[in-house]
Image (tube, grey):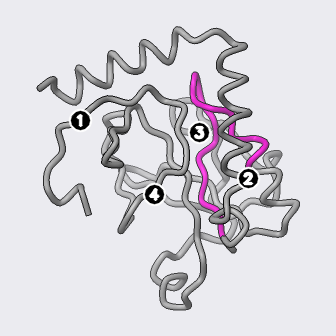
Amino acid sequence: MKTKREIRREVLAIRDALSEKERRMGSLKVADRIIGHQWFYQAEHLLVFVSYGSEIDTTEIVEEALRKGKKVYVPKVEGDVMHFYRIGGLSELAEGYKGILEPTGQSEKYDEKARLAKGERVLMIMPGAAFDMLRNRIGYGKGFTINIYRIKKICRFTPSVSALPVRWWRRL
């Protein structure tokens, strides 16, 4: 089996080679599937990445969530940890880690334990370099700490592979 590094390199090369038109069409398909999904409608809180490089464009998803009155949180890298902060619009973001748009960190910080204790419905949309059919994910290799009990993906615009090299605890 290939290493995570090899898989990441190959899959990102495929994604980076997509034309602007292919990327735009893929982004629209993903946005339609997410916005039209019951998880999106039922969610009170949305944790979502801000597009960077050849990733899908999440602008439409963020704007629709805000229009629907959802609480939207986007990531900010602080040291070796990624925290999510609430935003009221994309205009509140500034260039941060590796040139990625991030919140300033002055707004409400997402508190996972409090949300889970209250039983609030949260949808997280995560980026990744590669996914397999068992919902395993390879990120970009930095290993930021994001406490997630289970990741469910309702769509992807990343080439999938048959299997990823993961440790058993990553399957939870």
Q: Name the residue under label 1.
A: 163
The x and y percentages for residue 122 are 58, 71
- Position of residue 155 in the picture relative to residue 72 (left or right): left
Q: Mark 2 points at which residue?
A: 35
Which residue occupies 49% across, 49% down? Answer: 77
First in sequence: mark 4 vs mark 3 = 3
Residue 64 lies left or right of residue 54; in this view the side is: right
* Mark number, residue 96: 3
Let me know if residue 29 is in the magenta part.
no
Task: Check whether the beta carbons of the residues at disc 4 and disc 3 lie within 8 A of each other.
Answer: no
Q: Is residue 83 left or right of residue 109?
A: left
Q: Please tell me the numbered disc located at residue 152.
A: 4
- Say whether residue 47 is magenta: yes
Q: Residue at x 65, y 36 (%)?
A: 95
Badge 2 marks a residue whose secondary structure is: helix
Nearer-N-terminus badge (4/1): 4
State which quadrant residue 43 falls in.
bottom right
Disc 4 element: loop
Badge 3 or badge 2: first in the primary sequence: 2
The magenta region covers 45-61
- The quarter of the picture where the N terminus appears is top left
Depth-wise, is mark 4 or mark 3 nearer the camera?
4
User: CA separation, marks 4 and 2?
Assistant: 15 Å
Kindly identify the residue that appears in the image at 39 percent across and 59 percent down: 146
Spatial distance from mark 2 to mark 1, Cα to Cα?
A: 28 Å
- Three-letter amino acid code of the residue under disc 1: Ala
Of the numbered discs 2 and 1, the one sitting upstream in the chain is: 2
Instruction: Pick whichever, 164 or 36, lies toward us.
Output: 36
